[in-house]
Image: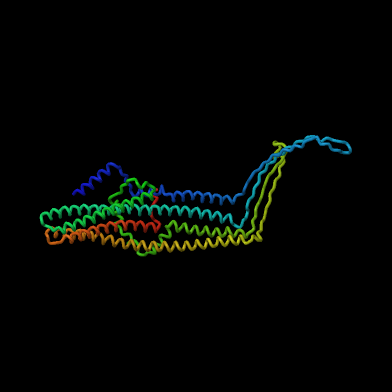
Amino acid sequence: MRLALKVFFLIIITGTAFPQKTLTLDEAINIALQRNTQLQVALNNLETYKSGLTASYGSLLPSLGASGSWRWNRAEGGTIILEGGIPFQVPTTESRNYSAGVGGDWVLFDGLANIASISQSENNLEAAELSLERLKQDITFRTISLFYEVINTQQLLKVAQEDLLQAQKNLETIMERNKLGAVTLADVYAQQVDLGNAELEEIRARNNLESAKADLLYFLGLDVLEDYTFPDEFTLEELDMLKKRFTKEYDDVSVLYSEALNNRFDYRSALLELESAYDGITIARSGHFPRLTNSFGLSSSSEKVGDLFKFNTYSVGLTLSIPIFSGFSVADRVEVATVNAMNREVELSDLERDIKRSIQKTFLDLQASEKSLNVSEKNVEAAQENLKIEEEKYNLGSSRLLDVLVARTNYTNARVNYINAQFAYIVLSEQLKYYLGVLDYKNFE
């Protein structure tokens, strides 16, 4: 009884002295999507892909530049020269010259490298956008897993605390009955051992909860020393999820696999990266083809600024460059691009097999979790009834305390298994959505 009062007053004092912040799953996901540094880096890098696409389109346009110059010359006089035997003194002269011009170059053909560059930039940008969406799903699922780990350990702590209080109550009852001679001293010692074990379990459960909280808060970018509270009961959505049997909706895992290939952002991104690698081969091979460039310009020169562009010079030209031998550099670039495309194909094949493996494993785990959930729920009911029977028999003197302790341990284990089964089923359900690529995150941004 004293222990129960201590725990009660400790909870009251802690709650009034240090105001706690309640953190829901929706809030946790929103915080994660706002604070995750990896996501922020990906968003920053996305701007470089946009800039690269603009530059690729710019390669189709002519380059244009303007120039201007000014020159001043002064020739000092005083030099004596002879011309026809007659001496002359050269006078001092000054001259100024102004010139201005505009011109540029236009690549008319470069072996289709500029066209392939645009395609490659578009693929790279779209692939980066899809990778960003997949990263958001990664963050969402990671948050869900860590959050439910906290709720799971919190429920287990409640079981441990209830078991501890019951063990204390039982010890007080047995000690009173021992004073009356109704039970032996051995029963008192046995109950003291049971109380000690309950205290250890409560300490272990509390440490697990604090560790789970720290992991979640660290991932969310929050202060791990802040005191947060979490929901004690399942939401309506979670209760509906526990009642729903997701695996019955699918008769064949291949259906899930086909759905995943259509929905997975990372798979679609890998396909685009492969197309980008093929564009790289086209760009590399362009070095084998002639290059046709157009040049154009307008220039003017005069001794006075006001006379500029009164007399102009126009120029237009075409330059055809034909590669004959480049020291195998083009062949090397083609080989590197080809190998890069081959590696992309291998990575895509690995991703396909990984998707299939992940979906199959998660689907089987979810099926097993459904059965475990049903069995553990029935085990709790059976263990509870068995405990009642053993306690009644012990109170009537027809049973041993050991039988009651065993029954109570079985009941506690059944409750723990049921709690673990519930959260395992919820997390596996979300995990299957994650592997299918349908895990929703947009409502939390």
Q: Which residue: 21% across, 49% down?
A: 3
Q: How is the image coloured?
A: rainbow
Q: Is residue 37 left or right of residue 406?
A: right
Q: Which residue: 64% across, 61% down?
A: 327
Q: Answer whether residue 434 is visible to the viewer in this image.
A: yes
Q: Answer whether residue 444 is visible to the viewer in this image.
A: no
- Which one is in front, 382 or 408? 408
Q: Is residue 3 left or right of residue 29?
A: left
- Which one is in front, 221 or 300? 221
User: Taking 266 as reference, is 64 above or below it?
Assistant: above
Q: Is residue 139 left or right of residue 413?
A: right
Residue 432 spot, x, y in % from top left: 37, 59
Residue 274 spot, x, y in % from top left: 50, 59
Q: Is residue 174 left or right of residue 120?
A: left
Q: Quadrant of residue 21?
A: top left
Residue 219 spot, x, y in % from top left: 38, 50
Q: How many marks?
A: 0
Residue 252 spot, x, y in % from top left: 36, 65
Q: Which residue: 48% across, 53% down?
A: 128
- Which residue is outermost to the right? 85
